[in-house]
Amino acid sequence: MTETTILAAYGLLVLLTLLLQVIGGMQQLSLGYLLSSRDETRTVTGMTARLERALNNSLVAMALFAPAILILVVLDRTGSASLLAAQVFLIARIVYLPVYAFGIPAIRTLAWLTGFAATAFLYLLAL
């Protein structure tokens, strides 16, 4: 596994998060509303709302993680440390999704911090 493979795997996890959130939204909101211009604001609740927040957080994480990986690849600075950091990031984000969806805050925060620290480490490696 390489850093770019891990980046692709994380992209798939973000897509899965989006799919789960959309499925939940379809169950809570009418199909007519989903097909409309959505001028009227409706909100989702429960797990679907948590998945929506997890998706937003995952997109921010992707926006930070992807450039770090790409910078390391372009600079040819990948190695065992960057691979380990990318693996830690991916594992943390895999843990983050279900614990956020099921509303387990302490583990969610720990998973988020772990992924954030791994991303910061990747940027340090790029300097």
Image: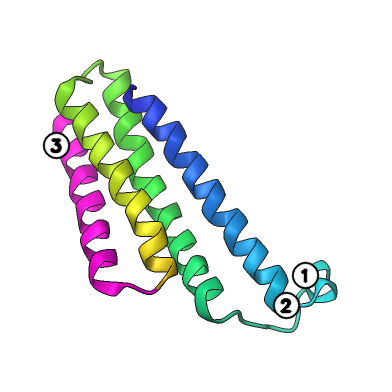
User: What residue occupies the far top of the structure in this picture?
Assistant: 76
Mark sitting on residue 34:
1
Is residue 36 left or right of 118 when viewed as pictured? Answer: right
Position of 9 relative to 42 (above/below)? above
Question: What residue type is disc 3 on?
Answer: Leu
Name the residue that disc number 3 marks. Answer: 124
Name the residue that disc number 2 marks. Answer: 29
Q: Give the image quarter of residue 23.
A: bottom right
- Secondary element under disc 2, as helix, strand or loop, is loop
Give the Cα distance between marks 3 and 1. 43 Å
Is residue 9 left or right of 126 when viewed as pictured? Answer: right
Q: Are marks 2 and 1 in contact (CB under 8 Å)?
A: yes
Give the Cα distance between marks 2 and 3. 44 Å
Around disc 1, counting alpha carbons within 10 Å, would you say few (fewer than 14), some (14 to 19), or many (20 or more)? few
Is residue 8 left or right of 112 when viewed as pictured? Answer: right
In the rendered image, residue 10, in percent from the top left (x then y), is placed at 43, 40
Residue 126, visible in the rendered structure: no
Query: Of callouts 3 and 1, which one flags the residue occurring earlier in the amino acid sequence?
Result: 1
Would residue 119 be counted in the magenta stretch? yes
The front one of 44 and 68 is 44
The front one of 112 and 61 is 112
- The residue mark sitting in front, 2 or 1, is 2
In the rendered image, residue 84, in percent from the top left (x then y), is placed at 20, 31
Question: What residue type is disc 2 on?
Answer: Leu
Q: Give the image quarter of residue 72.
A: top left
Q: Residue at x 25, y 65 (%)?
A: 107
The front one of 92 and 79 is 92
Would residue 104 be counted in the magenta stretch? yes
